[in-house]
Amino acid sequence: MLELLRKHARFFLGATLAGVALRLLWVAYFPAVVDDSRVYADIAGNWLHHGVYGITDSGQVTPTLSRLPGYPAFLAAIFAIFGTNNFHAVLLIQMLFDIATCFLIADLARRLFSDRAARAAFLLAALCPFLANYAAAALTETLEIFFTTLALNLAIHGLECFRDSANFESRAVRLWLACGLSVGACILLRPDGGILYGAVGAYLFMLLVRRLSAARSAESSLSRLRPIFAAGLLLTLGSFAPLIPWTLRNLHTLHQFQPLAPRYATESDETVMTGFNRWTKTWIADYTSVQEIYWRVPGDAIDLSRLPRRAFDSAEQRQQTAQLFADYNQDHEITPEIDAGLAGLAATRIHSNPLRYYVWLPALRITDMWLRPRTDMLPSDPRWWEFDDEPVWLIVSMTLLLINLAYVAAAAVALLRSRAIFGIGLFVLFLTLRSLFLGTLENPEPRYTLECYPIVILAAASLLIVRSNRAKRKLA
């Protein structure tokens, strides 16, 4: 990669400056410090100044396990240097991580395709408005994308070592352990980072089965399988060892075995609205409903007219739902009685149409997350298809919609044509597993697909170049 940078120094300098300028534009005009940002900052400040990993509740610092320690540790390090709650410094440093991600994507493209593809991938990444957007948001996305790309890059390096088993001990040990540690960093940032471990592990298992079936003798089988076993063990060690201190802390401080974080990021004594969550999944299909309904409960009044028609199967269901939310709107709290009523509605709807719950709605949620304009960090109207937003923001929404469609469509075409590309199975596995997981969520937020965007950019770049011989390499 260094040789490529020296050979095309002007190109990379210009593209880097353009990428930095784009990210500074987002930081200057659309910095996003949201509720989750403040929760992370509160934990980081308490950890830094009081030595307690906790949240502030009525003036008291209470230990918490609702958030994994990766992002609070990042914030605490920045706050220690630049001052507590200095989000401007946070966003600028995230911008540097995002630019580093662009170089990692370019390095992947260089290895898989050609130098020309590396330049195309770097330009697509540097000018990607969606990566730049979240570099200006005090959330986990930028770091999660960086470590995801780093792990994939290291995995491809490690897979190349399988070509020559004799070199495995000298080089691949470091690569696979580093890959595992990168996956571990993803998990420490967000629990769904574990999907990356599942994808890499599943790909190693596929290679294991392929080599086992191709082995001609027990001795040759063992020699060919040993590197894959070693890679899997190193990957597992690196991925989960960083969780041990967190798990022990939760056992010691809160007397709970919690190696990750609660499913709904709740506190130990906080009630989970299981009925509401299950009922929501019987109809929610897009991010607009997340903003208008899901995020507003509890605490805000709910306008029943904002529910789509698919939320009711009959006039009776509509009446029951209206009554439950009339009760909710009195105090803006989901009481056990209201939650039980919504659970009953959910059970009835699932029983009457299980395909809708288990297949069609998850598919719609996945589609919505992938194809939306990705304006969730902007003041645009989420109901962009009604075309009643301010002209400027309507143009912004339509432009970002077309850009996203271009990236995704180009990547889809490239992946469909790329069966012979070295390591392509790993990328497809990750895209598939992550998309399927996202379909199970009650809150289909477009940002959750951004961890897949390095692969989208990589694949899209391959359409812009003439493939070199490297594109047709196969794993031996």
Image (spheres, rainbow, N blue to C red):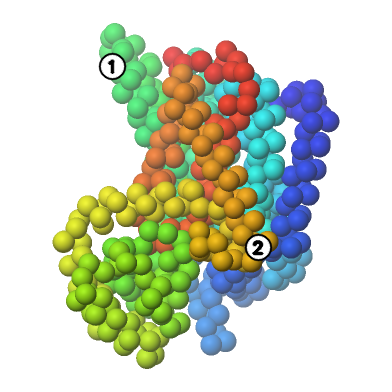
Q: In which quarter of the image is residue 91?
A: bottom right
Can residue 248 be seen here? The reply is: no
305 vs 456: above or below: below
Left or right of 66: which side holds 454?
A: right
Q: Which amino acid does label 1 sit on?
A: Ser
Q: Quadrant of the C terminus?
A: top left
Q: In the structure shown, which secondary structural element does the residue marked by tag 2 occupy?
A: helix
Q: Residue furthest top?
A: 216
Foreground residue among 136 and 268: 136
Indicate the position of residue 364 as horizontal and vertical percent values. 37, 52
Q: Residue 273 in the image: x percent, y percent?
A: 33, 74
Badge 2 vs badge 1, beta-carbon distance below 8 Å: no
Residue 41: horizontal and vertical position, in percent? 61, 69
Residue 224, image quadrant: top left
Which residue is pictured at 51% across the width and 15% down the height?
A: 472
**Which residue does the image show at 69% across and 43% down from the upper left?**
127
The residue depicted at 57 percent of the width and 32 percent of the height is 460
Task: Read off the residue under disc 1.
Answer: 213
Compared to residue 438, the image places residue 415 above or below, namely: above
Q: In which quarter of the image is residue 341?
A: bottom left
Question: Residue 391 — which label?
Answer: 2
Q: Earlier in the sequence, mark 2 or mark 1?
A: 1
Q: How crowded is mark 2: few (under 14 residues within 10 Å), some or many (20 or more)?
A: few
Tell which of 370 and 231 is nearer to you: 370
Residue 30, position as x, y percentages in the image: 69, 63
Q: Distance between the residues labelled 2 and 1?
A: 61 Å
Which of the labelled discs sits on residue 83, or is there none? Answer: none
Total of numbered circles in the picture?
A: 2
Which residue is at 37% across, 78% downward?
A: 304
**Which type of secondary structure does the marked residue at label 1 adopt?**
helix
